[in-house]
Image (cartoon, helix red, strand yellow):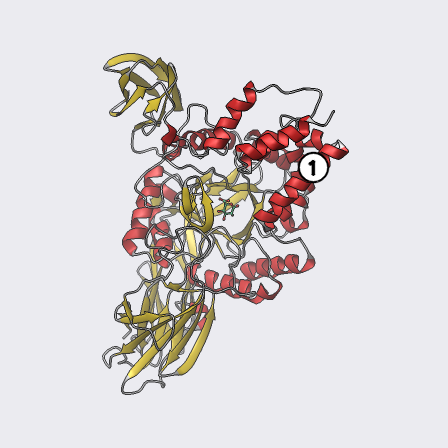
Amino acid sequence: MRKIIDLNDNWLFGKKLEGAAEAVTLPHTWNSLDGQDGGNDYYRGTCWYRRELSTEETAGERLFLEINGAAHTCEVFLNGEKLCCHEGGYSAFRVELTGKLKEKNMLEVSVSNEDSDRVYPQKADFTFYGGLYRDVKLISVPDKHFELLKDGTTGIKATPVVDLEKKTATVTVETWHNGESVDITVNGETKTVERTAEFVIENVHLWDGLDDPYLYTATARLDSGDEVSTRFGCRAFACDPEKGFFLNGRSYPLRGVSRHQDLKGKGNALSYEDHAADMAIIRELGANTLRLAHYQHAQEFYDLCDENGIVVWAEIPYITMHMPNGRENTLSQMRELITQCYNHPCIAVWGLSNEITAASAVNEDLLENHRLLNELCHRMDPTRLTTMADVFMLEIESPILEIPDINSYNLYFGWYLGELEQTDEFFDEYHAKYPDRVIGFSEYGADANPAFHSSCPEKGDYTEEYQALYHEHMLKMIEARPYLWATHVWNLFDFAADGRDEGGKHGENQKGLVTFDRALRKDAFYLYKAAWNKTEPFVHLCGKRYINRCEDRTEIKVYSNQPEVKLYVDGMLIGTQSGKTVFRFELPLLGEHLIRAEAEGCGDSMVIRHVSEPDESYIFNKAAASVTNWFDADEINPECFSINDTLGEIRSHPQAGAIVNQMMAKGASERGDVADAVKDNPALQRMMGRMTMLSLLKQGGADEESIRQLNRILQGIKK
Ligand code: GCB
């Protein structure tokens, strides 16, 4: 018989082995606070966990230790003897303890998240929490047992192949064990085989996405009594360059969000309840797909995706910067991801890398690394496609796009750079140039701090209103392009990026539709809910937190999945609108008003009021906000250059060009690697050339004084 014991309690923790005296319970990370407070100064080093093993715990013929997540490099010692080293912070691994056990046993585990030139990730926009942040278990099995060591395998693999016409599935179940034979059971039928058995399921009950995520179970049993089982789902995925994604033969556009595995105050040390709470929010939103970025997530979470019918993009943390010494690590992380996640029916694609050319050139070493990863995926799993998330400045002609089966781009036009419409243009151009290639939209988003508000939302103002406008544009853009095989909002939740300090918060990326603590759904959340959630009728009044408004007439926006919305002001019906998703009303703002929106069976209320002065607490970058006003009013001599000219115009003049180039080089060196990649990218340079100097400066976060100063200099140069 197999016995699994939870080993989460009774650990002692510390930065030094001898000093490891702080009592902790797993899951645990040492960066739950310093990894989330900004400054990019969280502890990245080695820490120790130690624990005695009781005789009860160590009973059994063969004993294995299972560590489900040790970020990022881990060494395991038993009674002072080193048993193994594991590199990769997101996958599970096991080590055998049999034969090493004594009367009294001390387990010591060192975990390190320090810099490395070998283990990914090293450069990315999220906190690399260190710790034993998932469950640790002891597994005791009989001498004849299923394989436990190789790449963290469970010893059983189920491959269902569906014939949609015949309504059957052929399921191949492979097992790895050291016994003579194995009894494998699927759907009530048992076969005794050496290792592999094939089953045909008639009238197969499909795993059919959100509608009906039906799961089967395959069980394997040895004579010794050792038993393993896995759930699997029978479904057919396909992608078409013109028609997008197909599930079980019908068009099924993948529309959803990305998720990081962390939570405010807890870091990545999440409980099952935390995972389940996230899934409940995903179901409320109505998303049918998740990109589980940027690494292997917890098994519990893939299980939740299986159970809820969410189609998943799974990936390894081969991200931002290619490391010449990191090839083996990309391959081992991919081997573990596929081995450990293969049976999950939710997973549709394996992601090879993310924005890997953001801080690296497309050279032969990088191409070769991708080819090897791609071949590995196909060798280990011929049933799934490979993909990649390309950074926006990667030229669409680049040879790297030919490596994975299908592609996707992360585009932030309308946030970091450029205008919203450039996203539409980008995909139109791509699709026209490569009509035979499958393309998707793997990331897009805009940061919003729900404390900030504006009636004239602008890129870079961090308002809830700009984020909502941004996503309204993207939603339309996506709905008009059914060929996009998958689209994923970046991100469902705000998450920790300790290197960030912006938008009124330290250490957070605020592109979430929901705040880091999950307490608040921003307006943009309800936009997607209105578009995607087909089961729960609702109306949502936007701008509930934008109470004090200066204007005499104000816009009231309602998001709803209902076809008709009524708006009441102070109890009086002022308008009824029919439409889809977004409903806009305008009304005079005189004093304090109670606003209520109603649709069939649902309603939402809020209070807004007229004030004479702008409420300063709603404005994040007061300097940048005042620049617009100040500049419009200022006298500008049109015969000389000014910051209202485009970068392209300014650069075409030797003297003016030299000044802005110098200024931008200084900014770039302060921002680091990504800025370098911008400099070397002709397409991006062309795009920036079309933007005004003022918008570039504001986007770069320049203060009012630097903007004035540059304008004074430019005004001294005749065109
Ligand atoms: C990206 C990255 C993601 C970042 C995101 C952002 O392209 O893939 O990791 O968090 O941009 O918000 O800048």
- Decide: few, some or many residues near mark 1? Use Cα within 10 Å; few <14, some 14-19, many ≥20: some
Residue at the image point whose x is 40% and y is 72% from the top: 110
Q: Secondary structure at mark 1?
A: helix
Can you give x and y, in whole percent of width and height, for residue 301 in the image? 36, 54
Residue 281: quadrant of the picture: top left
- Work out which quarter of the rendered image holds the C terminus and state it: top right
Residue at the image point whose x is 45% and y is 66% from the top: 45
Q: Is residue 414 visible?
A: no
Instruction: Out of 593 and 249, give the one closest to the viewer.
Output: 593
Q: What residue would you read off at disc 1?
A: 659
Residue 175 in the figure: left or right of residue 318: left
Residue at the image point whose x is 50% and y is 57% from the top: 317
Residue 602 in the figure: left or right of residue 115: left
Can you give x and y, in whole percent of width and height, for residue 82 in the image? 42, 80
Counting every numbered tag in the picture gives 1
In the picture shown, does residue 219 fall above or below 668? below
Residue 43 in the figure: left or right of residue 242: left
Instruction: Out of 615 and 283, give the one closest to the viewer.
Output: 615
Of all residues, the one furthest to the right in this rendering is 654
Can you give x and y, in whole percent of width and height, for residue 139 in the image? 31, 73
Residue at the image point whose x is 40% and y is 44% from the top: 494
